[in-house]
Amino acid sequence: MARDAGATRWRFAIGQGAAWLLALVASIAVAAAEPASGAASVPANVGAAGIQVERSTDSTADSATEKAGASRTESAALAARFPDPDIRYRTPAFEPGHDGFTSNAELRALLQGLVRDGSGGPGATRISLLWLGSSQTGVPLEALHFTRSAAADVLPMPALMPAPPAASASASASASTAAPKSARPTVLLIGQQHGDEPAGAEALIVIAQELAQGRLQPLLDQIDVLIVARANPDGAALGRHLTASGIDMNRDHLLLRTPEAQALAQLAREYRPIVVADAHEFAALGRFVAKYGAAPRADLQMQYATVANLPEFITRASAQWFQKPALQRLKADGLATEWYHTTSADPADLRVSMGGVQPDTGRNVSGLRNAVSLLIETRGSGLGRAHLLRRVHSQVIAISSVLSSAAARAADLLKLRRFVDAEVAAKACQGVVTVEATATPGEYELPMLDLATGADKRVTVAWDSALVLVPVKMRRRPCGYWLGANQSDAVLRLRGLGVQVQRIEQAGAMRGESYAQTARDTGREAATRSDVLAGIADGGPALRINVNLLPALIDVEVGSYYVGLDQPLANLVVAALEPDTPNSYLANRIVSEVSGLARVLRRPEAQMTAVP
């Protein structure tokens, strides 16, 4: 009965202009509400697109996973539960005599060796190497772009672009010329945002090889693919979780403090991928040993975007079109799976939490871009090279499944994107928006393994589910936001995300609401951004403020800005500009003052021009 009621609500919302979605309703089952089983360097403080790069002010900031269980080793019986598969992969790390992981130099040479111009005629595969800028130590940030053009849209391939000899912020932005785009949906694959999680990069090398000349190549008839095999080359070189500046780049996708996060934002802005898969590794031992006397059972954990204001169709497509078949493929290969989960650094806190619900991770920010967004984590952090083949194999199976699902659903994905983009934009000026939400507490029986014997062991834990969010703070959805003329840093970051911003060319007034600050806390403990793990390694403590909304006639000056919510990325705008959340631009000092920001409740009539 619940499923029929949900379908009825969908039919009411769809209207006459999107009849294809009626078939979508039938094909997407209601998602379960509960869990089931070297180049020249660039200035270190300047990133792509000219956005200032910040460093963590916490000298003790380091990886939670680096510290978790670093002194622990597996028993022989526990290790025996994770045998290597009977398969061979051709990455540098698996070459005889190689005792580490693929180096940055080896990776770059391998990527360059895959490039081809697609000159074999219609249907030939074109592989371009895109230069996206440089890391904080000058390592090129690069992506492979795979496409197969039909006869009617064969376009010239851009030249391979090495890092310029003296890269500036403007050069960094302009040098990243996009490769030709097709009408097919694009899938973006990301590896090693955390430098101490190597299996993702190794797996994406395999995926790139298979797309170039292997079993995955036929999928390019239906989809284009972007691969960023190593998003954090500085961290990888040091085996370190964080970027060179001490910031966790996977918590930087809204604020864009690092050139590494800016590079991924640039790809998302230029190619608008409809599917994003992000490869990570979770701690094989760590805090679970200390808290529960057991080790995680899963080979691989997955989770799609779980964040406030996420379009419901995106959630359902993620669960049924992508996660479900991937888990089936993994199970068929004898690999154990689970929802992604973690636990805090506090030894007295026995809660287990699914992945976070804040709009800062790549998973959730991609979801707010109206993309199917999947986190894929293998059991590996803290293991060194132990079980590396099994870890990489698990990633390869999961990512191959994601690509196969995207190819099979290519037409539906394009329709889904058009519908959701229009739906989000149409909500401006009406209804409510969730400003902040939290996970739902409950209990869950977690499959684990006995440390000594390796035997299955089920542990009942307090479980924070991210599948159903509890709104903490909701407000009327405005038509948009006004930003003062002195808020150019916020405008630059919004444009970096791909958000449409307009410059006001005519002084006047806008009817709206101003924010009246009622409390402000700048103390480090109260203001530190945090997630379910611990405090986030960041560029400094965030402000924590409380506000009241006051009706206002906003005097707008020439040179100030309007950010409308009548655009597909409206939900990203809300995450950035509602001021009283830990992730907001005000809390993180990108918007300099609360008086420089206001909510606009009527569509403005002033003369405006688009900010490039």
Image (cartoon, rainbow, N blue to C red):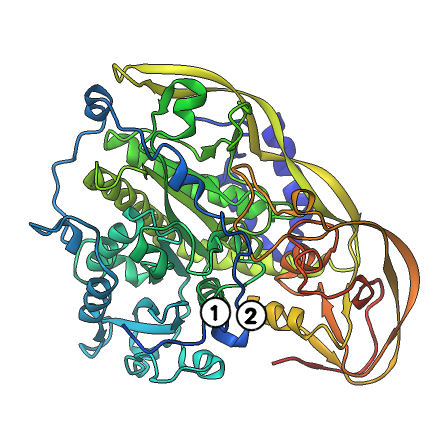
The reply to whether callout 2 and callout 1 are in contact (CB within 8 Å) is yes
Q: Which residue is mark 1?
A: 266
**Measured from the top left, where is residue 509 in percent x and y?**
90, 75
Give the spatial CA distance, label 2 vs label 1. 7 Å
Q: Which residue is mark 2?
A: 496
**Measured from the top left, where is residue 143 in percent x and y?**
34, 67
Image height of 111 relative to 462, above or below? below
Tell me the amino acid under the disc marked 2: Gly
227 with respect to 183 (left or right): left
**Measured from the top left, where is residue 389 in percent x and y?**
19, 41
Tell me the amino acid under the disc marked 1: Gln
Residue under the image location 42 percent in, 23 percent down: 290
For mark 1, does the 10 Å Cα neighbourhood hold few (<14), some (14 to 19), or many (20 or more) residues? many
**Measured from the top left, where is residue 28 in percent x and y?**
49, 40
**The one of 183 and 115 positioned closer to us in this rendering:** 115
Q: Which of the 4 quarters of the picture holds residue 323?
A: top left
Q: Secondary structure at mark 1?
A: helix
594 with respect to 182 (left or right): right
In the image, farthest residue toward the left: 96
Image height of 337 relative to 566, above or below? above
Quarter of the image where the N terminus is located: top right
Say which mark, if any, is on residue 20.
none
Residue under the image location 47 percent in, 71 percent down: 270
